[in-house]
Amino acid sequence: MKVHNIMEVVVRDVISKYKNELNMPCTCDHCMNDVLAMTLNNVKPQYIVEESNSAYIRAVHEADRQGATAILTKVAWAAGIVGQNPRCYNMKNPSDH
């Protein structure tokens, strides 16, 4: 059996779209994955079985202004926490870069 949490794709899209506006001190893959994980832990998962339903569900989330705003708010919250407490190598040893 294989299922997929479509919210992972939705949240990734939001992070990509607003990456520059998040004002994070580091936007490396590790920091962005931390933002993704924190956000996903705070949104309701939506699992799909057929990948063909992916586009429809993503479109519904984008069209739902309140839902889209709620996700963006959670992404911004997670980015704030990660930005204040980066766990990546870049920020732990900034003199090395």
Image (cartoon, rainbow, N blue to C red):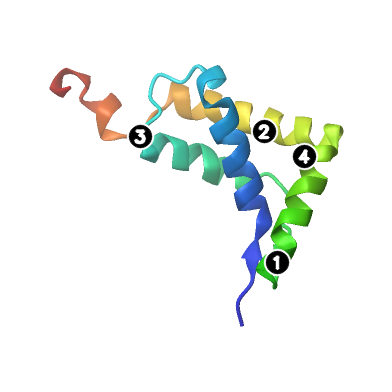
Whether 94 is drawn above or below 39: the answer is above
Instruction: Kindly report which numbered mark, 1 or 2, lies closer to the viewer in this rendering.
Output: 1
Residue 97 visible, this orientation? yes
Task: Name the amino acid, label 1.
Answer: Ser
Looking at the image, residue 77 sits to the left or right of residue 31; the answer is right
Task: Name the amino acid, label 2.
Answer: Lys
Query: Percent x, y for residue 63?
Result: 83, 39
Residues at circles 2 and 3 in contact by the CB criterion of under 8 Å? no
Residue 41 visible, this orientation? no
Task: Return the mark for residue 87.
Answer: 3
Instruction: Report which residue position mark 2 lands on.
Output: 74
Query: Percent x, y for residue 40?
Result: 62, 47
Give 65 or 84, whichever is nearer the viewer: 65
Please tell me which of labels 1 and 3 falls first in the chain.
Answer: 1
Looking at the image, residue 48 sits to the left or right of residue 64; the answer is left
Instruction: Kindly report which numbered mark, 4 or 2, lies closer to the viewer in this rendering.
Output: 4
Please state the total of marks drawn on the protein image: 4
Quadrant of the rendered image containing residue 97: top left
Please tell me which of labels 1 and 2 falls first in the chain.
Answer: 1
Whether 49 is drawn above or below 36: the answer is below
Instruction: Report which residue position mark 4 lands on.
Output: 62
Task: Return the mark for residue 34.
Answer: none
Query: Percent x, y for residue 94?
Result: 22, 20
Rendered-image quadrant of the N terminus = bottom right
Query: Residue visible at 74% across and 63% down?
Result: 53
Judged from the image, the secondary structure of the residue bearing numbered disc 4 is helix
The CA span between labels 4 and 3 is 31 Å
Task: Return the mark for residue 52.
Answer: 1
Instruction: Kindly report which numbered mark, 1 or 3, lies closer to the viewer in this rendering.
Output: 1
Query: Residue visible at 32% across and 34% down?
Result: 88
